[in-house]
Image: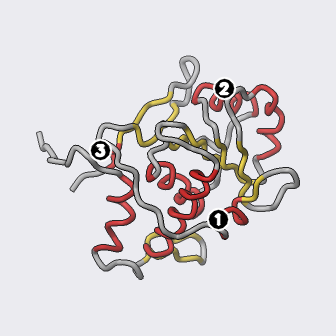
Amino acid sequence: MCTVDLPERMNAASVLVDSHLERGRADKAAILCGDATVTYRDLSKGVNRMGNVLLGLGMRMEERVAILLPDTPEWVFAFFAAMKIGAVAVPMNTMLLAKDYEYLLNDSRARVLIVASSWLPKVLEVRDSLKYLEHVIVAGEEMQGHLSLSKLMESESTSLEAVDTSKDDAAFWLYSSGTTGFPKGAIHLHHDMVVE
C-alpha cells in the first residue's frame, strides 16, 4: 500500500490552486468551459474574491456553504473558496426537486447558498422551511431582493490568505443518492484531495 507523507497543517485550496502560481503556471489553462479559458491566475483571483465574499457574510470555519450551480468557473470558485476560508463546501445535484433541496440544506445546516438563477425558484418553494439558511447568493440573471454573485465578487479583493487548517479538517460534504433512505453527507477531509 502506498502512503503519502503530508504536513499536519495544510489547506487543499492552497495546494490545488495557489501552488500553481508559485510554480510559474499562472498563465496556463486551469479550466476550459465552452469558449472560455480560465488561467490559474484567473482561478486564484476568482477563488479569493469568492472567499472574501463569504467572509464578508460572516462565514466561519467549519460552517457549510451549499453550491447549486452548473459546471462553470463560478462552481470551482465557490468550491475552493469555502475550503480556503476553512468553511465546508456542499455541492448539490442540480437535478433534484424542491423537497430534496429542503432536506439537504437543513441536514447540512448551510448558512449560505450559492445558486444559479435558473434553480432559484425551486429553493424559493421551500425557503420558509430552511431553518439555518441566512444568505442566498444568485449567479447568472440578477433577481430582485437577492444578493448578486457577480456584483459581490467584482467589489472584493483578489488577495486572500488561506486559513490554517489541519489535513484532517473537513473540506467538503458530498451527499449520497439516497436510494436506500435519506441521502447521507459523506465528509471529505483536506488530505483526501491531495496526493503529491
- Give the CA distance from mark 1 to mark 2: 28 Å
Mark 3 highlights which residue? Answer: 191
* Viewer-nearest of discs 3 and 2: 3
Mark 1 highlights which residue? Answer: 153
Residue lying farthest top?
181
* Viewer-nearest of discs 3 and 1: 1
- Residue in the picture at 66% in, 44% down: 113
* Crowdedness near tag 1: few (<14), some (14–19) or many (≥20) residues, C-alpha within 10 Å: many
Where is residue 109? Give x, y as percent: 60, 29
Q: Is label 2 in a helix, a strand or a loop?
A: helix
Q: Is label 3 in a helix, a strand or a loop?
A: helix
* Crowdedness near tag 3: few (<14), some (14–19) or many (≥20) residues, C-alpha within 10 Å: many
- Give the CA distance from mark 3 to mark 1: 28 Å
15 on left or right of 143: left
Q: Which mark is residue 182?
A: none
Position of residue 78 relative to residue 123, above or below, is below
- Residue in the picture at 65% in, 46% down: 68
Where is residue 90? Give x, y as percent: 54, 40
Mark 2 highlights which residue? Answer: 103
Image quarter in which the N terminus is found? top left
* Viewer-nearest of discs 1 and 2: 1
Q: Earlier in the sequence, mark 3 or mark 2?
A: 2
Where is residue 70? Give x, y as percent: 63, 55
Residue type at the position of mark 1: Met
Residue type at the position of mark 2: Tyr
Residue type at the position of mark 3: His
6 on left or right of 87: left
- Residue in the picture at 16% in, 47% down: 4
159 or 22: nearer the eye? 159
Q: Are marks 3 and 1 in contact (CB under 8 Å)?
A: no
Residue lying farthest right?
144
Image quarter in which the C terminus is found? bottom left
